[in-house]
Amino acid sequence: MTNGARAQQREQTRRTLLRESRRLFASKGYGAVGLSEIVAAAGVTKGALYHHFGSKTDLFRAVLEEVQQEVGRTVATTADAEDDPWAQFTAGCQAFLTASTDPEVQRIMLVDGPAVLGWSEWRALDEEASARHLAQAISGLIESGAIAPQPVAPLTHLLSGAMNEAALWLAGSESPNDLADARAALSRMLEALRAR
């Protein structure tokens, strides 16, 4: 087997491990999934798993990062479809809230993420994945005069926290109207930031 073929096989094994562990983590939760179940679902050995990931936590971290990147792409694609910076900002925030209602996203990103990795590491990953982009959008809106001049960091953390909390609330929601109500409340909250 050539080096290129081996590298391709290693990457395929890694992708399979990520896919199967993501499916299991999403359906059962991190705590209920064992390494034996993951390697059986992926059709690989524990040695192959440990070749790619040092532990179950490392594997979960990679799955979480993948989920965060997907949500980030959804937010960016939705925002980029708008021409006006304010419309981009509000569409992106709404897209995050909507994407976060996916049960897989909720379980991995919002429920198990902080519990498995700890609050500090989860916050750092969240900062890298989305809060940085939110801060850039807010900075741009302040510079353009759409939002009154103010410190960016507190506003970014307040909005990020509000959207994450709303997403967690929606995860336990049983009313079909709750997403629409949360989106409407988010719209009112964002509109209140707008400079008059």
Image (cartoon, helix red, strand yellow):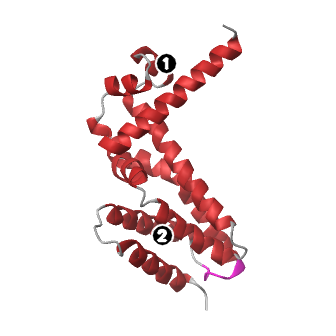
Residue picked out by circle 1: 51
Q: Amino acid at mark 2?
A: Leu
Q: Which disc number belongs to residue 59?
A: none
In the image, the segment drawn in magenta is 144-149
Q: Which image quarter holds the C terminus?
A: bottom right
State whether the magenta stretch is mostly helix, strand or loop.
Answer: loop
C-alpha separation, residue under disc 2 versus residue under disc 1? 39 Å
Q: Is residue 65 magenta?
A: no
Disc on the earlier residue, 2 or 1 = 1
In the rendered image, the vertical position of residue 147 relative to residue 34, given as above or below: below
> Residue 38's image quarter?
top left
Asked whether the viewer can see residue 181, the reply is: yes
Residue at x-position 33% and y-position 27%: 37
Tell me the residue at 59%/64% (across/down): 135
For mark 2, what is the residue? 159
Task: Pinpoint residue 44: horizontal percent, then vertical percent.
Answer: 44, 18
In the image, 10 versus 131, the foreground residue is: 10
Picture quadrant of residue 75: bottom right
User: The N terminus appears in which quarter of the rendering?
Assistant: top right
Q: Is residue 141 left or right of residue 100?
A: right
Q: Is residue 128 visible?
A: no
Front residue of 180/89: it is: 180
The residue drawn where x is 58% and y is 84% is 194
**Label 1, residues with CA under 10 Å away: few <14, some 14-19, many ≥20:** few
**Element type at mark 1:** helix
Q: In which image quadrant can residue 193 be found? A: bottom right
Q: Secondary structure at mark 2?
A: helix
